[in-house]
Amino acid sequence: MADHRRHRGEDGQAIAELVIVAPVLLLVIVLMVALGRVDSAQGDVTSAARAAVQAAAVQADPADARAQATQAAQHTLAGAGLTCPSAQITVDTSAFTPGGSVAVTVTCVTSLADVSVPGMPGAKTLTATAVAPIDPYRGMS
């Protein structure tokens, strides 16, 4: 028959190991959640820049391009549920001519306070830029 008696101190050793390992595992889990949130938020900012540049590239003039790009970026950020209280949307229409291009840069400072761990910042600045060509045959009928 097998001996199922426990040796004195084995229970205490298992508890001590759990007390040491549990906080480390918890820290790893929180860090993974925080990094996942940052990656997801960066994807949302990139999507906003792409949507904005697509909206701008089909407009007739630079003023309309800036207005539509700003609206598209704000709509995309709001739809993603990204907490970005003061998004900065910069539309570069300096080459807004047939065959030229338009560029949109979206900058967002998002809060990580709900998943912050010691040593991690409470906010992260995310930036994305998208460029689209302007149809070279625009205006030709």
Image (cartoon, helix red, strand yellow):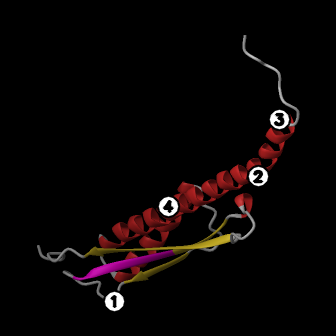
Q: Residue at x 29, y 87 (%)?
A: 95
Residue 31 x %, y %: 64, 58
Residue 40 x %, y %: 53, 58
Q: Residues within 10 Å of mark 2 (few under 14, many from 20)?
A: few
Residue at the limit of the structure toward the bottom, as seen here:
94
Q: Which residue is mark 4?
A: 44
Of pointers 4 and 3, the one earlier in the residue sequence: 3
> CA gap, disc 4 to disc 1?
26 Å
Q: Residue at x 72, y 54 (%)?
A: 24
Q: Amino acid at mark 4?
A: Asp
Q: Quadrant of the N terminus?
A: top right
Of pointers 1 and 2, the one earlier in the residue sequence: 2
Of pointers 3 and 1, the one earlier in the residue sequence: 3
Q: Which residue is mark 2?
A: 23
Residue 25 relative to residue 98: left or right? right
Q: Which residue is mark 1?
A: 94
Residue 140 relative to residue 44: left or right? left
Residue 2 x %, y %: 72, 15
Of pointers 4 and 1, the one earlier in the residue sequence: 4
Please state which of the two labelled residues, at mark 4 or mark 3, is closer to the viewer.
3
